[in-house]
Image (spheres, rainbow, N blue to C red):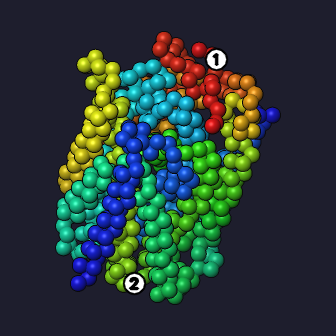
Amino acid sequence: MRHLQLVGWLAVAVVLCALAIPWFLWGDARTVAGISLWLWWHIGWMGLASVVFWLFSRYAWGLGIEPDGTAPSADTSSTDGTDTGGDQP
Amino acid sequence: MTLALQLAIIVGYLVLALAVGLVAYRVADRTAEDFYLASRTFGTVVLLFTTFATLLSAFTFFAGPNVAYQEGPEWVLVMGLMDGIIFAILWYVIGYKQWLLGQTHGYVTLGEMLGDRFGATWFRGLVAGISLVWLFPYVMLQQVGAGTALTALTEGAIPYWAGAGLITAFMILYVVLAGMRGIAWTDTLQGAFMLVITWVALLWLLAVVGGPTSATAALEAEAAQHLALGSDHYTPQWMLSTAITIGFGVAMFPQVNQRFFAAGSRTVLKRSFALWPILCVLLFVPSFLIGAWARGLDVTIPEGGNVLPVVLAEYTPVWFAALVIAGAMAAMMSSSDSMLLSGSSYFTRDLYRPVLEYRSDIHSISARREDFVARVGVVVFATASFLVSLVNPATLFELGDAAFSGFAQLALPVIVALYWRRTTRAGMTAGILASQAFYLASLFTATVPSAYAGWTAGIVGMGLGLVVTVGVSLVTTPAADEQRALYFDGLRAD
């Protein structure tokens, strides 16, 4: 479950990065209200990124870093929640 | 008369900043943790604005609009990707983990955190040393920016050396007094000031030229190619290389990285994380639009001059142009003061103190002595970079770009160390040295090319560093004094 969540959020991060530059508007010179269409895309995309980051901070903060679930101060004692699989010293 | 007015605005601004610094000095504890990290107490607004103002350098105000004027405004997309998204993600991936480790183990610098994990003082010194090598030219860049701005504003009445010297002297005084808390407070004021002043400048310009539609029509008549996304200058490879190297480089810049330790709580980190892209749009879009639209306006930019001051001088009253120059100096100072403080903390804690402890068999240096060395470090660092700036003619952009890519070389080995237990000291050392050597060679020798099918040496070096760190870690065993579980076990918020 945690693993699935991690993969999902990683995918979201990759999409946010990949479309921050609107490649599909490459060479496009259209303007809307005096501002380039691709600049409007930029403004909208940053707004979307902000919403996505807010959702992450609300529902998934700690993922991949803290040893247990997303609940801020859950008192479970499991310590090996990281997916990196490193061995113990 | 106008010169006097301009100088009065700038001096008034500097005095205000100094007053804030003095208030901070009065409330500060006399401990290293307070001087360097304000005792880890920052709230959302202060952390967000201090990081933001620290990030923004003379580049946003001068080199950025210059590039938009000459090549078109696509840079804003690069800035959005690198600062609004990549850096925000690193804010979590590196920043939150560093913050947790700082809370648990009391780390003040990146080198301290890595040196503890990898069990070697010399490794700590290596990280600090490399950081200082890149920090130095960047501080110089800020001084060049301030000196040039003052010269342009006063039309040569204040020569470059006097302008940059004045700013340097002021900053030394200020940083030595104020420490991190004072710097963060003024950063917050400076960040808010820059944001407001940039928007007023844009709206003013638009009011004079008749709105965005006519400004764009004028640009189309003059340089239609600037409206279309992409050009010979802005290729996909170049845009991605630049965004990725600078985004990762920012997270390793001492003055930014150290702020990861300074947040007051996890809520502060969360809120700043979500607000980050919005703040980027709010500042970068107007700044780059002014530069881009200036191309269609009837202004002549002198050879090597900055676009923004010329446009403002033409379209807005003298006092407003002076305010914007003060805003640019605020940007430059809020970066430099933080850099001086962080540079001094790296020098004192990671280089000077370990060496002294080793040589003299003293295991703790008095707080008073450390304090003194920290302040002397600030003076030496700032003076040296000012003196070098007097003879260095390279452009702002080249200098800045080199420093960001240089820091970017550190980022992937650090991320590997934070998330992979099998990382070894040998792997880290090899990865860091290989990527630094490669990138430096690409800058200073002809044998290592600076571009690879459109990709920059900076990003190729990052890949090299990642491969070497992981590869060497796989084939080596950890040294006896490495603490492999340090970054994993017992990490919990609050």
Q: Position of residue A33 (x, y in %)?
A: 62, 80
Is B391 placed left or right of B128 in the picture? left
Q: Relative to residue B279, is residue B388 depicted above or below?
A: above
Q: Position of residue B330 (x, y in %)?
A: 38, 63
**Location of residue B110 (image quadrant):** top left
* In-front residue for pair B375/A17: B375
Residue lying furthest top: B480
* In-front residue for pair B55/B205: B55
Could you classify mark 2 by the number of other residues whose Cα lies within 10 Å: few (under 14), some (14-19), or many (20 or more)? some
Tell me what residue is drawn at x 41 percent, y 65 percent: B61
Tell me what residue is drawn at x 62 percent, y 74 percent: A30
Tell me what residue is drawn at x 44 percent, y 63 percent: B189
Q: Position of residue B335 (x, y in %)?
A: 39, 54
Dividing the image into 4 quarters, which one contains the C terminus of chain B? top right
**Location of residue B365 (image quadrant):** top left
> What secondary structure is found at the residue carrying circle 2?
helix
What amino acid does circle 2 point to? Answer: Tyr
- Label ID, residue B315: 2
Is B118 placed left or right of B489 in the picture? left
- Label ID, residue B57: none
What amino acid does circle 1 point to? Answer: Asp
Q: Relative to residue B37, is residue A86 depicted above or below?
A: above
Dividing the image into 4 quarters, which one contains the N terminus of chain B? bottom left
Alpha-carbon span between mark 1 and mark 2: 65 Å
Subunit of mark 1? A
Report whether residue B220 is seen: yes
**Location of residue B345 (image quadrant):** top left
- Label ID, residue A87: 1
Subunit of mark 2? B
Report whether residue B447 is seen: no
> What secondary structure is found at the residue carrying circle 1?
loop
Tell me what residue is drawn at x 29 percent, y 35 percent: B368
